[in-house]
C-alpha cells in the first residue's frame, strides 16, 4: 500500500474548498461572512500551490492575500453601513448577459483543459531559488514596472485621501 | 510488508507521526503558557517589590494550574448580541497559526517538525494570519471597545510586520538561506549573527514586541482606555485560548526566531558530543528573551497610538530599508568576509540609539513652541 491516493484526495478537497468558497463569497448576503470565506478560498489556493511544489508562491499567497488584503477588506466592511434586510444588488438584473460572458470564457478554458494529453508535470519541490532567479533576471523589467505602478497607485491614494479640508484647517487655526 | 521507523508499518506511521507531533506541540504550548504566566507574575512582583503568587504550592508554583482549572470549569458565557459563529471561530483563528508555526522551530540538531527551505517566510506568513482572527474577534463581539481594539490591533500588526520582515531579509542576505536549520548551522562557533547584524536584531526585537502586543505597544488591550480591547466580551476558556495560549505561544515563537536567527539556535558547548543538549540550550536562550520581554513590560509605559504609528513609519521602516541596502551592497562588494557588514551594522546601531533622543527632543521643542504660539492669543483674550 502506498500513498499515491493521498494527492488526488487532497486536490479534490482543496478544489471543493476553492469552488464552494468562491460561490459562497458571491452568493452570501452577510458581507463579513463573505470576507472570511474569501480568506478561506485564498488558503485553499495556497494549498493548491503547495501541491504543485510551489511553496514560496503559497507562502506569499497567504502573506499578502490572507494577512493583508482580507484584513483591509474587513476594515472597509466594518466602516460601511449595512442593514439586515434583503437587498437587490444593481448587477443582479443582468443575469442572462453575465451567463453569456461566463460561457464565453469558461467553454474555451474547459475545452483546452480537457484536451491536455501529456503527463502532468512532476514538481521537484523547492522553487525558491528558481523563482528568485527568474524574477531578477528574465522578468526584471516587468517586475520593476509592476513596482513602479504600485508605488504610483499608493502615492495617488495618499494624495486623494489627504485633502486640505478648509473647515478643519480653520478649526486647527482657532485651536 | 515494508517496515518504517521503529518497526511500525509506514501506513500507520504517517498518521501516527502527525498525531505525535500535534500532541507534542500542544503539550509544549500549554506548559509554556502556564510557566510564562507564572514567570510574568513573579518577575513583575520582584521588580515592583511585591511577593507575587505564593499561596498555592511551593513558591506559588501551582497558582497558574489552579487558574487554568478555574478557566476550564467556567461557564461558557456569550452575550446575546454577539455575532454567532464568528465569536466562536475567532479564538481558533488566532490559535491555529500560532500552533502551525511550531512546525519549523528547530529545538535541536534533528528535533524539528519539517526542514522547509522557506522556513522563515513560513513563519512570517503565519504571523500575519493572526490579524484576521483579532479583527474578527473585535467585530463579532459587537462592542465598541472590542471593535476599536481589533482595528487598532490590525493597524499595528500590519505596520510592524514591515520592519520585521525587512530585518529578517538582512539575515537571509548574510546567511544565504531561509531554512531555519541552515541558519542555525551557519552560526557554529562563538561568532553568532548578533555580532554581525546587531542592528537588524534590534529592529526585529522592537517590531516583535509590537507584533506580540507586549507592553510598550500593548495598545489593542490598553486597560485604561479600552477595558480589555478585543478580549472584552470573552471569558472562560475562549479567553484562555486567545490570551493565555495564543499570546504566550506567539511570544515563544518570536523568541525562538530571535534565538535561531541571531543567537545560534541550539548551538552551545557540548552539543557535538550530546546532540540532545541542544534542546536545553535552545530552551534556555528562548526563555532568556522571554524574561527580557517581561522586564521591558515591568519597566516601560505604554505609547500613544499616533506615537506608535509614527515610530514605525518614520523611524523603524526607513532605518530597516537603509540597513538592507547597506548589508546588500557590502555583501556584494566583499563576498568572502563579513567584517565590513559587522562594522556598518554596529555604526548604524549607534546612530539609531543616539539619534532617537535628539530627534525626539527637537520634535517636542517644536510641538511645545507651536502649542505656546497657539495658546498666546487665547490667553490675551481671556485677560
Image: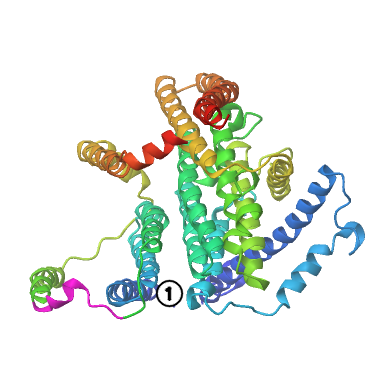
Q: Is residue B202 visible?
A: yes
Residue A112 position within the rendered picture, expressed as x and y whole percent measured from the top left: 11, 68
Label 1 SS: loop
The residue indicated by pointer 1 is A2
Q: Which residue is more in the foreground, B164 or B338?
A: B164
Identified at 28% across, 77% down, the residue is A27
Examine the rendered structure and indicate whether residue B3 appears above or below residue B221. below
Q: How many marks?
A: 1
Residue B243 position within the rendered picture, expressed as x and y whole percent measured from the top left: 64, 61
Residue B136 position within the rendered picture, expressed as x and y whole percent measured from the top left: 48, 65
Q: Residue furthest front?
A: B383
Q: Which residue is more in the foreground, B136 or B283?
A: B136
Kindly identify which chain the residue marked by label 1 belongs to: A
* Residue B235 within the segment the image draws in magenta: no
Quarter where residue A86 is shown: bottom left
Picture quarter with the N terminus of chain A: bottom left
* Residue A95 within the segment the image draws in magenta: yes
Q: Which residue is more in the foreground, B56 or B96?
A: B56
Residue stretch rendered in magenta on the structure: A86-96
Quarter where residue B209 is shown: top right
Examine the rendered structure and indicate whether residue B101 appears above or below residue A106. above
Q: How is the image coloured?
A: rainbow
Q: Is residue B266 left or right of residue B376?
A: right
Identified at 87% across, 59% down, the residue is B60
Q: Is residue B113 visible?
A: no
Q: Is residue A174 left or right of residue B258?
A: left
Residue A101 position within the rendered picture, expressed as x and y whole percent measured from the top left: 9, 70
Quarter where residue B20 is shown: bottom right
Label 1: how many Cα within 10 Å (few below 14, some 14–19, many 20+): few
Amino acid at each position: 500500500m502506498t500513498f499515491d491516493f493521498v494527492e488526488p484526495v487532497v486536490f479534490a478537497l482543496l478544489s471543493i474548498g476553492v469552488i464552494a468558497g468562491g460561490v459562497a463569497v458571491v452568493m452570501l448576503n452577510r458581507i463579513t461572512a463573505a470576507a472570511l470565506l474569501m480568506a478561506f478560498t485564498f488558503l485553499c489556493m495556497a494549498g493548491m500551490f503547495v501541491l504543485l511544489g510551489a511553496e514560496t508562491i503559497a507562502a506569499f499567497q497567504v502573506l499578502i492575500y490572507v494577512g493583508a488584503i482580507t484584513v483591509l477588506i474587513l476594515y472597509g466592511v466594518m466602516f460601511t453601513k449595512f442593514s439586515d434586510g434583503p437587498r437587490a444588488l444593481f448587477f443582479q438584473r443582468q443575469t442572462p448577459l453575465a451567463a453569456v460572458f461566463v460561457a464565453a470564457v469558461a467553454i474555451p478554458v474547459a475545452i483546452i483543459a480537457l484536451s491536455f494529453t501529456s503527463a502532468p508535470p512532476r514538481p521537484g519541490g523547492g522553487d525558491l531559488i528558481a523563482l528568485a532567479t527568474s524574477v531578477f533576471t528574465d522578468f526584471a523589467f516587468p517586475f520593476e514596472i509592476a513596482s513602479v505602478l504600485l508605488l504610483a497607485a499608493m502615492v495617488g491614494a495618499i494624495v486623494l485621501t489627504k485633502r486640505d479640508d478648509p473647515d478643519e484647517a480653520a478649526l486647527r487655526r482657532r485651536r | 510488508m515494508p517496515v518504517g521507523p521503529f518497526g511500525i508499518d509506514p501506513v500507520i506511521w504517517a498518521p501516527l507521526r502527525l498525531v505525535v507531533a500535534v500532541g507534542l506541540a500542544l503539550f509544549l504550548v500549554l506548559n509554556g503558557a502556564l510557566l510564562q504566566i507564572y514567570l510574568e507574575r513573579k518577575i513583575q512582583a520582584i521588580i515592583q517589590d511585591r511577593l507575587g503568587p505564593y499561596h498555592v504550592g511551593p513558591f506559588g508554583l501551582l497558582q497558574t494550574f489552579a487558574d487554568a482549572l478555574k478557566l476550564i470549569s467556567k461557564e461558557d458565557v456569550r452575550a446575546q448580541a454577539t455575532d454567532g459563529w464568528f465569536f466562536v471561530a475567532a479564538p481558533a483563528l488566532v490559535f491555529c497559526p500560532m500552533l502551525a508555526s511550531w512546525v519549523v522551530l528547530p529545538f535541536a540538531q534533528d528535533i524539528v517538525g519539517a526542514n522547509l527551505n522557506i522556513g522563515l517566510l513560513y513563519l512570517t506568513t503565519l504571523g500575519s494570519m493572526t490579524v484576521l482572527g483579532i479583527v474578527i474577534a473585535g467585530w463579532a463581539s459587537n462592542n465598541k471597545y472590542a471593535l476599536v481594539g481589533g482595528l487598532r490591533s490590525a493597524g499595528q500588526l500590519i505596520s510592524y510586520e514591515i520592519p520585521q520582515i525587512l530585518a529578517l531579509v538582512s539575515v537571509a542576505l548574510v546567511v544565504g538561506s531561509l531554512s531555519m536549520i541552515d541558519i542555525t548551522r551557519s552560526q557554529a562557533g562563538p561568532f553568532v549573527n548578533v555580532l554581525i547584524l546587531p542592528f537588524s536584531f534590534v529592529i526585529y526585537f522592537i517590531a516583535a514586541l509590537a507584533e506580540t502586543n507586549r507592553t510598550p505597544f500593548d495598545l489593542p488591550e490598553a486597560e485604561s482606555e479600552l477595558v480589555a480591547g478585543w478580549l472584552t466580551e470573552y471569558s472562560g476558556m475562549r479567553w484562555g485560548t486567545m490570551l493565555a495560549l495564543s499570546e504566550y505561544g506567539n511570544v515563544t515563537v518570536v523568541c525562538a526566531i530571535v534565538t535561531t536567527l541571531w543567537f545560534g539556535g541550539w548551538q552551545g558547548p557540548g552539543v557535538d558530543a550530546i546532540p540532545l543538549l541542544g534542546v536545553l540550550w535552545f530552551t534556555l536562550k528562548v526563555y532568556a528573551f522571554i524574561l527580557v520581554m517581561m522586564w521591558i513590560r515591568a519597566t516601560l509605559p505604554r505609547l500613544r497610538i499616533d506615537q506608535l504609528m509614527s515610530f514605525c513609519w518614520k523611524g523603524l521602516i526607513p532605518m530597516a530599508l537603509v540597513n538592507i541596502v547597506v548589508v546588500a551592497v557590502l555583501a556584494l562588494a566583499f563576498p568572502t568576509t563579513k567584517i565590513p557588514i559587522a562594522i556598518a551594522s554596529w555604526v548604524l546601531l549607534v546612530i539609531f540609539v543616539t539619534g532617537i533622543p535628539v530627534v525626539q527632543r527637537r520634535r517636542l521643542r517644536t510641538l511645545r513652541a507651536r502649542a505656546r504660539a497657539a495658546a498666546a492669543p487665547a490667553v490675551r483674550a481671556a485677560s
